Structure formats: C-alpha cells, structure tokens
Image: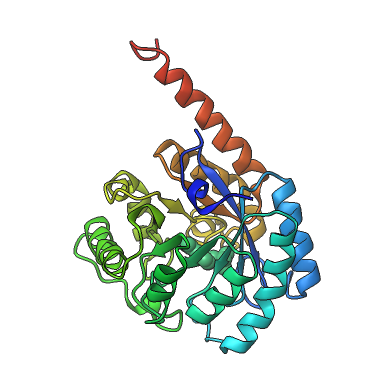
Amino acid sequence: MSSTATLLRPIGRCRVMGVVNVTPDSFSDGGLWIDPGAAAEHGLELAEQGADLVDVGGESTRPGAMRIDAEQERERVLPVVRRLAGQGVDVSVDTMRADVAAAALDAGAVLVNDVSGGRADPEMIPLVARTGAPVVLMHWRGHADRMQDLTQYDDVVGDVVRELRAQVDAALEAGIAPEHVVVDPGLGFSKTGEQNWTVLAGLDTFASLGHPLLVAASRKRFLGELLGDDDGHRPVTAREDATAALTTLAAAAGAWCVRVHDPLRSVDAVRVVARLAQEIRSTPEGLP
Ligand code: PMM
C-alpha cells in the first residue's frame, strides 16, 4: 500500500484509478455493486487488472441525482473500503461529506476524492487539513440536481482554471499541504458535451496550476453522444475504446491519474505513453 508521501510522487507514468460505485443509480455501473461483498470483489478485480488505486463511492453524482443521507452513504462505502484496504489496495473515497471521508480514512482509505472540491461541506477542507490526507479537488459549481443549469462560461478553460484555483487557494489557506492537492477539471460537471471537449483540448492549461492532474472521462455521456448513431447515443458499456483513447491523450498531456471503470485498456495505454515518452527523452534531436 502506498504512503501519503509516495501516492502523489511521479512513477514515470500516469496512474490508473479503478471505479467502484456502491450505488443503485450511477450512470455507468449503477446497481451492479450495491452489495458490499460484490463491490469489494469487484474492487479487488480492478486492482488485479492493474489499477493503482480503487475509488469507492456511495452517492451518485449523475445529472439530476438526489442526495442520499450520510448514514446510508457510510453504510455503503465503509465495508468496501475496509475490505479493500485490508487486502493492501490503495483506496480513495469518493465523497463530498467530511464525516464519510473521516470514517473512510479510519477504515484505511489513503486519498479523499471530493467532487465538490471542498465546496459542498464546510467541514471537508478542515478535516483533510487535520488528517494530512491527500485530496482531489474537482471543479464544481453545484449539486447534481442543478449542475446542468450552471454551464455559463465566458471562456470555459480560463474560467474553470480560475474557479479551481480559488478552490485550491481555500484548501492551502486552511493548511492543506500543496503537495497533497490533486486537481480535476470535472468533466461533465456543470459542463456541456461541447465544453468537455474544450476542457480536454486545454488540459495543458490545467497543468499550470502546479498540482497533479486527475482526468475522469470514462464512459461519460459526451463520448456516447460523439459515437452515437441514428438509434441514439453509444451505450455506456461500448465506450471503452473511446475511454482508452482519452486515457492515452491525458497521459501524454502529463496527467497524474485517469479514473476509469474498466482499467484493462487504460493500464496498457499509460504504459505505451510512458515508453514513448522515455524514448523521446533519450533522443536528443527528437524523433526522426
Ligand atoms: N466523476 C464521477 C464520479 N466521481 N470524481 C472525480 N474526481 N472526477 C470525476 O469526473 C468524477 C468523480 C461521475 O462518474 P461515475 O458515476 O462513473 O463515477
């Protein structure tokens, strides 16, 4: 299992985070892993497939989703975190609630993944500062029930970077160490399909924030829209090659980690990018 000190340090390639949603309604895998035993087994499978981290979440953030109560979220997440951490897997907890994050860290999680970037629960940033845990701060404008009404930008990349920087500054002011902060542009969160593409085209700009970058495009709706036909969007389970293509591009852009539901192709993709990057570095004149 990685320590806090090693989790964010460079390892010569982009990391891969596997996803386990212990929810009945996530868009990508809702209902599949609602039983904690099945969820934990799935997490172990993701680790065996080469995921460096397994992200466990108990609350759906799909557009329009309603919030669940904290007790229910804890009941979904904690047994899975405990079991995976007990088996030596590096676990992140996908939660917007400080008390769920605290309980998950006690149960062995090594990273807090807060899609609200500290904005949903005023206790989250102080909790992370107190525990010294690394944290993913995602760009966020509002909860799932209204996030798709919050897609007005003058310049989507510039505005998202500026808002994310404000979230990072709040975390640093509260005492979170800069080297413990990961940033994430939040694809699909208060962003239209078109805006997601613009954000992806501007990934380099996010690197300018000076923190490791997490990119979570896996199976998202904008891929289904792009690849759809007259019958409608490409189904969620047929978006894996598109997901791996974006893993390749995110890794080449220097991402610290990609968050994916099916790690196999992404694990190969990050290795290919790392090998090529090594070759380019060792060829002083550049490639022929
Ligand atoms: N997206 C989802 C859930 N958690 N966490 C981070 N850091 N970034 C994301 O973009 C993100 C996330 C929604 O997707 P899911 O329902 O497939 O988990």
Q: How many marks?
A: 0
Residue at the far left in the pictured view:
154
What residue appears at the point 75 percent right and 56 percent down from the top-left corner?
87
Q: Is residue 143 above or below residue 258?
A: below
| Residue 2 seen in this snapshot | yes
- In the rendered image, the vertical position of residue 62 relative to residue 235, given as above or below: below
* Location of residue 236 in the rendering, given as x and y in whole percent from the top left corner: 62, 61
Please state the horizontal and vertical placement of residue 196, each as a whole percent of the image: 38, 58
Say which residue appears at 54% left-offset and 75% top-offset: 102
Which quarter of the picture shows residue 178?
Answer: bottom left
Q: Is residue 110 left or right of residue 164?
A: right
The front one of 66 and 12 is: 12
Instruction: Name the residue: 52% across, 49% down.
Output: 7
**Residue 60 appears in the picture as rendered:** no
Q: Please state, as top left, top right, bottom left or bottom right, where the C terminus lies in the image.
A: top left
**Left/right of residue 202 with respect to residue 63 in the rendered view:** left
Q: Position of residue 153 (x, y in %)?
A: 24, 67
| Residue 121 x %, y % | 41, 81
Closer to us: 32 or 175: 175
